[in-house]
Image (tube, rainbow, N blue to C red):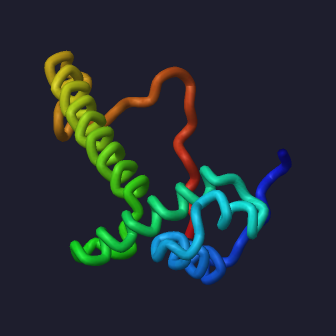
Amino acid sequence: MGRPPILPADKKLGLLVRVMSGQLTAAEAAREVGVSEQSVSNWRRQFIEGARNGLAGESGKDPEEASRIAELTQENAMLKATIGELYMELRKSGRGTPGRVPQPCGKTRPARRVN
């Protein structure tokens, strides 16, 4: 079976209302628009999750997006801790002491001033 047709949201909503009110079964709705029964079930699940989130005051927040934000926040905290540890190691070795101006290595020429 090929890729299912892309249906506008209002068409999906109309189908879901008919399915949820008992006018159509999921299989009948799927045949009517040329998609799988699983697609109709997925739309129904997404519709119910969206309604639940809307009633809970979380409208517009995608669960996947919230999960990704939590993941990035955790990664950010880990990276900050790693930076802190590396900074402390540099301080111990004397290479990261505050106020110390790094000296060039090898043969380098000072940069020309541009006015």
* Quarter of the rendering containing residue 6: bottom right
Give how far across and how far down residue 31 sits, in percent: 74, 62
Residue 45 horizontal side relative to residue 71, left or right: right
Residue at 55% x, 77% y is: 18
Query: Is 60 or 47 nearer to us in this picture?
Result: 47
**Relative to 66, does residue 74 appear above or below in the rendering?**
above
**Relative to 100, does residue 12 appear above or below in the rendering?**
below
Query: Is 66 or 98 nearer to us in this picture?
Result: 66
Residue at 19% x, 26% y is: 85
Give how far across and how far down residue 55 sits, in percent: 25, 77
Image quarter in which the N terminus is found:
top right
Residue 5 horizontal side relative to residue 60, left or right: right
Image quarter in which the C terminus is found:
bottom right
User: For the view shown, which residue lies furthest in the top direction?
Assistant: 93
Give how far across and how far down residue 100 sits, in percent: 23, 35
Query: Is 95 or 82 nearer to us in this picture?
Result: 82
Give how far across and how far down residue 107 sits, in percent: 56, 24
Q: How many numbered discs sit on the rendered protein?
A: 0
Residue at 35% x, 73% y is: 51
Residue at 45% x, 68% y is: 47
User: For the view shown, which residue lies furthest in the right direction?
Assistant: 2
